[in-house]
Image (cartoon, rainbow, N blue to C red):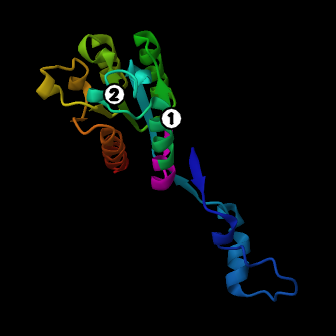
Amino acid sequence: MRGVIPESQEPDSYLTGQGCSATPQRDFLRSHQRFKRKEIHMPKILMIHGSNMNLLGIRQPEIYGTTSAAELDKMLVEYAQKKKFDLEIFSTNSEGECIDRIIKAHFDKVDVLVMNPGGFTYAAHSIRDTIKGVKIPYVEIHLSNHYERGLHSVVAPAAQGVIMGLGIQVYFAGLDAALYLAAQKKK
């Protein structure tokens, strides 16, 4: 998705008055009307909620918190609007669907992938290989601290960074990291 500068900010928006006499500035602006709408690239981020993440707020709230998946998605969309980036949220319990969406992200020209692999964390070698194969910058997030719980992610080696242990705040930190990576990618 691309953002467009509103009409009121366009350089020739004040040229519609009747009886305006020609000036060099107006003539210049009229001759360059093809630049009327200036497009601005908005970073395109794909957020994937992996296996069991649809049970947020229900499954083990003492570990994962009480915020539901729907409440979290609403907060993420509001955050994207506030920070002005394009966010797609995809949730799946199927490893194959996750892989297909990551491959599609390559062709959709997604700038950065942010994912909480959830139940895919421990055995989804094929997801890791797919992320490495499409070469989309990847930020992995986890609600709980895996080191505290003695857990290991097989997907994390594909990530530029991993954020964990801060509850739902990892999602917002992950999106901020994704914006940073998208900006670095454009340089």
Q: Secondary structure at mark 2?
A: strand
Q: Is residue 162 visible?
A: no
User: Which residue is pictured at 24% across the width and 14% down the height?
Assistant: 122
* Residue 129 at x, y percent in the picture: 30, 16
Q: Which residue is mark 2?
A: 116
- Residue under the point 48% across and 27% down: 90
Drawn side of residue 146 relative to residue 173, left or right: left
Residue 148 position (above or below residue 13): above
Residue drawn where x is 25% and y is 25% of the image: 158
Q: Which residues are magenta?
A: 79-88
Residue 67 falls in image quadrant = top left
Depth-wise, is mark 1 or mark 2 nearer the camera? 2
Under mark 1, the amino acid is Glu
Identify the disc placed on residue 88.
Answer: 1
Q: Position of residue 182 (x, y in %)?
A: 37, 45
Residue 181's place in the image compared with 141, above or below, is below
Looking at the image, residue 68 sits to the left or right of residue 63; the answer is right
Determine whether 31 is above or below 158 in the image: below
The one nearer the camera, 158 or 73, is 73
Residue type beneath disc 2: Asn
Question: What residue do we see at 40% from left, 12% from top?
Answer: 95
Labels 1 & 2 near each other (Cβ < 8 A): no
